[in-house]
Image: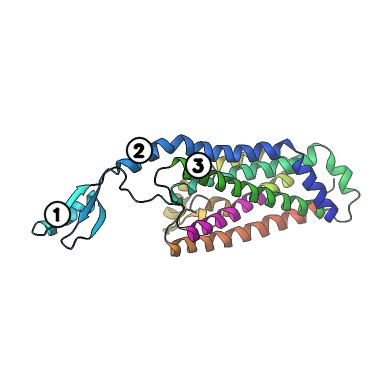
Amino acid sequence: MRNVIRMELYRMFHSISFYVTLALCVAMSCGMLVSLTPNKNRSYEQQSGYYLVTDAEGRQYRISADEVAQKEAEWQNGDVELRPLKYGEVESVNPGAIAHFIGTADMFIGIFAALFAAGFYQSGFCKNVTGILRHKYDIYVAQILCVILFSTMAVVLNAAGVVSIAAVALHYFQFTSLPEFGMYLLGRYLLCCAVGSLSLFLTHLLRSNLLPIIYSVLLSTTVMTALISLINDRISHLFSVDFDISNYFASLYTYAFRFSNMAEDMSKMLIHAVVLSICAIVVYNGLGLWQMTKRDF
């Protein structure tokens, strides 16, 4: 087993797809943030619709235009000062403004897993190796570990790159809400491992990386969002229930999994992500190990 793992790690670190997909993963996340930074900065600076309220006791707080309209009747006879917020008076921007950029990692993890598994068949490597192995499933275990290692590197580098750019270029950014951000990263990482496990399993099952790559790419497009919405509407209408298919599949829960400043909300989403991810990883890899032992190479 140890030699097989070492062999697959060697193959991974000496494959072009490893470096290309990892570089594109980080470049896409950081590039998207850089391109949107000017618009984000302008929106933070303008703070359109927000006002600073000073009440009769000298306390100050920020409210929106809608809240001003609701409280105008209460303030008619009160000593209240109201003025629009000026440049530089906005609150700090927390990691919630950049968390979704890290979510692009799942697409490249799925693509890498498919390319890596397909390389095992396309080069004829499988026929030379499986004949001398005592247990053919050793290969699958080694590839699972490679996918998990790649997922770790992709999520960590993505997060480091996005946070670094935000700290330098994004106005008012402060790295606050660390516990919630840590929970978000953990949930995102486990979901990415589940996506990689699914892609690995499908590639071995079909001996082709076409379908896993297409599915991984669709995960980052609005096409999948529209398809999920259509399925939810049809099932909800048919059975008269509030149904969301993304709550039952790890690869689809990436759409519902979001950063939240509220520790309670973030904890609930993390628990849901952990349960779905562990179930998906166990099922996909279990099926992959089983079919690897039954397959003739």
In this image, 248 relative to 5: left or right? Answer: left
**SS of the residue under disc 2:** helix
Residue placed under numbered mark 3 in the picture? 165
Sequence-wise first label, 2 or 3: 2
Residue placed under numbered mark 1 in the picture? 72
The magenta stretch spans which residues? 178-197
The answer to whether 186 is drawn above or below residue 170 in the figure is below
Sequence-wise first label, 2 or 1: 2
The answer to whether 2 is drawn above or below residue 127 in the figure is below
Mark 2 is on which residue type? Arg
Residue 207 visible in the displayed image: no
Q: Is residue 122 magenta?
A: no
**SS of the residue under disc 3:** helix
Q: Residue at x 15, y 56 (%)?
A: 80
Mark 3 is on which residue type? Ile
Residue placed under numbered mark 2 in the picture? 42
Q: Residue at x 66, y 47 (%)?
A: 199
